[in-house]
Amino acid sequence: MMLRWTIALAALGFGLLSGCTILQSNSQPPAPESPASSPSNAPTAPTVASPVVSLPPNGRPDTRVMPMTIEGTVVEIELNLFDKAPLPFTTYVPTQDFQSEVNESEQGTVSQFFFSPKGKKDQTAYVQIFLPARQTSLEEMRRLLLDESGLLASNRWSLVDRTNIVSYSWASEKLIYQQKTDKQNFVGSIYIGDYKGRAFYALTHYPAEYTDGFEPRSTIMLENLQFRDEQF
């Protein structure tokens, strides 16, 4: 199920979007060296260079391994750095579990990360980050999401709760929603953030039965979301 974000955005008219030497006295010759102390006979220890860890220009390594609790079991997950210039942010994505896409329009740029644990893209389970093309206030973003013609209404998502207590440093508000259909129930959250006076959002969307597997992975991605000028 593809998110119909373009309908809501068009309603608001969005435009295109780091040693001293000891001198011997001349009055007596230097003492002779013993065989043990002679430089020609003494073994020389090999010189081991200290390892140098070089970071890419963005200051973040290309891969990381992090522990994660998946369905009650702690496992180590390999993460790849998502770094797509000219996007102003980077994040880490579970290597084997997501496929990413970036789409641009006059309204803005959408980065989507589709859950693909078995190599097949699931279009009902994803993380999405939307950056509007023009300067957008937090209040405008709230209207974009919550108005009668906004994102939630156009996708038939029902608002369950909203709070300004959010665990991500870049987010100022969290909207929790659900969608009930005849065959499946979907859940997710929308996080409203601000970058240099320009509001944006990041959201999750997935079937309710995916919670134990999808939520920890998406949390890692959102926790590691950083803007480029904050990465040094």
Image (cartoon, helix red, strand yellow):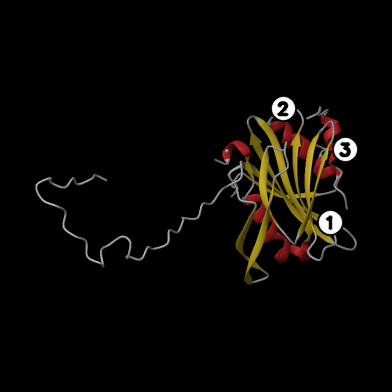
Mark 2 to mark 3: distance in Å? 19 Å
**Residue 108, position in %: x, y?**
79, 34
Labels 1 and 2: the sequence-earlier one: 1
The residue at the point 88 percent across, 58 percent down is 181
Secondary-structure class at tag 1: strand
Where residue 185 sits, quadrant-wise, is bottom right
The numbered disc on residue 135 is: 2
Q: Which residue is mark 1?
A: 124
The type of residue carrying mark 3 is Ile
Q: Which residue is mark 3?
A: 7
The residue at the point 85 percent across, 31 percent down is 11
In this picture, residue 193 sits left or right of residue 18? right
Between disc 1 and disc 3, the foreground one is: 1
**1 and 3 marks in contact (CB < 8 Å):** no
Q: Residue furthest right?
A: 182
Where residue 102 sits, quadrant-wise, is top right
The type of residue carrying mark 1 is Thr
Q: Nearer the viewer, residue 37 or 106?
A: 37
Labels 2 and 3: the sequence-earlier one: 3
In this picture, residue 133 sits left or right of residue 10? left
**Residue 48, position in %: x, y?**
45, 59
